[in-house]
Amino acid sequence: YEYENDSDLRVYKNVKKALKHLSEVQILDLSDKKLKTLPEGLGGLQNLKVLDLSGNMIKELPEDFWQLSQLEVLIWNRNALDSIPSRI
């Protein structure tokens, strides 16, 4: 995986690090962060209800994404997803 620049890499690392401390978060806005993949640990946000992933370059949703059992709203427009996953 390659990042366009060092700034993109820092954003990804900061998001991944922050997720470890956000177990109670209900709304998460990761829009327009130039993410190509979702950070590891996202599936551990068991209280997450709203997730905004719009304006990134995400091609697929990771397996732990499906652990977001409380998720009610997913905003994912302006991404690189080839198709809507059958699990949705």
Image: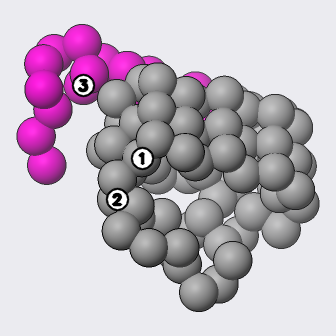
Q: Amino acid at mark 2?
A: Lys
Q: Are marks 2 and 1 in contact (CB under 8 Å)?
A: yes
Nearest-to-viewer mark from 3 and 2: 2
Q: Which residue is mark 2?
A: 59
Amino acid carrying mark 3 in the image: Leu
Which part of the image, by quadrant, shows the C terminus?
bottom right
Q: Identity of the amino acid at label 1?
A: Asn
Q: Secondary structure at mark 3?
A: helix
Residue at position x 33%, y 43% in the image:
57
Question: Residue beneath label 3, please?
Answer: 9
Question: Callout 1: 10 Å neighbours few (<14), some, many (20+)?
Answer: some
- Hey, which quadrant is residue 36 in on the image? top left
Of mark 2 and mark 1, the one earlier in the sequence is 2
Instruction: Judge the density around disc 3: few (<14), some (14-19), many (≥20) Cα neighbours within 10 Å.
Output: some
By secondary structure, the bulk of the magenta-drawn segment is best described as: helix
Residue 11 seen from this side: yes
Q: CA distance from mark 3 to mark 2?
A: 17 Å
Residue 65 on image: x %, y %? 60, 64
Please give the residue where the numbered disc 1 appears in the rendered image.
79
Number of dots carrying numbers: 3
**Boundaries of the magenta span:** 1-20
Q: Position of residue 41 (x, y in %)?
A: 56, 51
Colouring method of the image: one colour
Which-is-in-front pick, marks 3 and 1? 1
